[in-house]
Amino acid sequence: MAKTILAAGVAALMFMSAAASAADFAPYAATPPRGTSWQGPYVGGNVGYQWSHVDNNGAKPNGVAGGIQAGYNVQYSQFVFGGETDLQLTDADATFAAWKFSNPWFGSLRARAGFAVNNVLFYGTVGLAYGMLKIQNPLTNVMETHISPGWAGGAGAEVALLSNWSARAEYLYVDLGSSSFVLDSTNHGIQSSLLRLGINYRF
């Protein structure tokens, strides 16, 4: 997990550095018609990849994740604050010993805070998370699912494009709390790292 988080951090820093360089060289007049304003509501979608680890088991569910997000920003000079909610579907699963673990979906409700440089917004985010962990016996197809609360946090960079559209790259860590499963008489939770790309329409 530490290597995954380190790799995700390096990837995010590389994206942010490239975005900042592009913003430095782009003339101010070339920014979108909205200028540098991030104020107001937005909706969008995202897609990425998920790496996970299940508590008290060797399963490491990995897979593609994608979903939708919506939020609202308030801007004071170059400082941007707001909130965002998202809902994700994933095909992350893995089998260890007699059990298959998967995380079919999760969502979050997070605060965001960032700093705008020309048409680039650098931000951090943290808040509540919730989602499903499923355990299944592949031979009998007997399964058990639990929905658990948790927390999520991460960072990203978003670039304003033309016609109120923006694109972003984001790293998100999601920790869903453990609960007791009857099938294997063990407590399980799931921790995930996600790297994802998204696009938003800002109203």
Image (tube, rainbow, N blue to C red):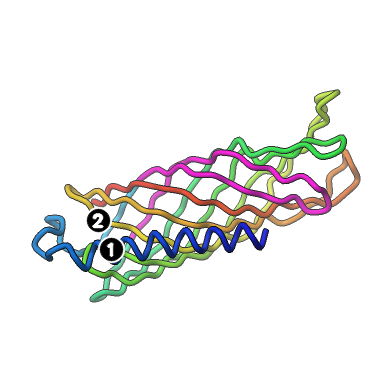
Return the residue found at the far top.
Answer: 140
Assess whether residue 85 is covered by the magenta stretch.
no
The amino acid type found where label 1 is placed reads Val
Q: Which residues are magenta?
A: 44-72
The residue under the point 15% across, 59% down is 31
Residue name at image x 40 percent, y 70 percent: 113
Q: Earlier in the sequence, mark 2 or mark 1?
A: 1
* Residue 182 in which image quadrant: top right
Judge the density around disc 1: few (<14), some (14-19), many (≥20) Cα neighbours within 10 Å.
many
Question: Who is closer to the viewer here, 145 or 138?
Answer: 138
Residue 34 placement (x, y as % from top left): 15, 58
Question: Callout 2: helix, strand or loop?
Answer: strand
Compared to residue 109, the image places residue 141 above or below, namely above
Residue ID for mark 1: 120
Q: Are marks 2 and 1 in contact (CB under 8 Å)?
A: yes
Magenta stretch, main secondary structure class: strand
Residue occupying the point 40% across, 54% down:
169
For the residues marked 2 and 1, what is the alpha-carbon distance in whole angstroms? 6 Å
Under mark 2, the amino acid is Ala
| Residue furthest out toward the right | 185
Residue 110's spot in the image, x, y percent? 49, 61
Quadrant containing the N terminus is bottom right
SS for dot 1: strand
Q: Residue 9 at x, y = what percent?
A: 52, 63
Towards the viewer: 195 or 166: 195
Which residue is depicted at the point 12% across and 55% down?
33
Q: Is residue 75 left or right of residue 31?
A: right
**What x and y, as percent, mark residue 194?**
55, 51
* Image disc number at residue 160: 2
Tell which of 59 and 127 is nearer to you. 59
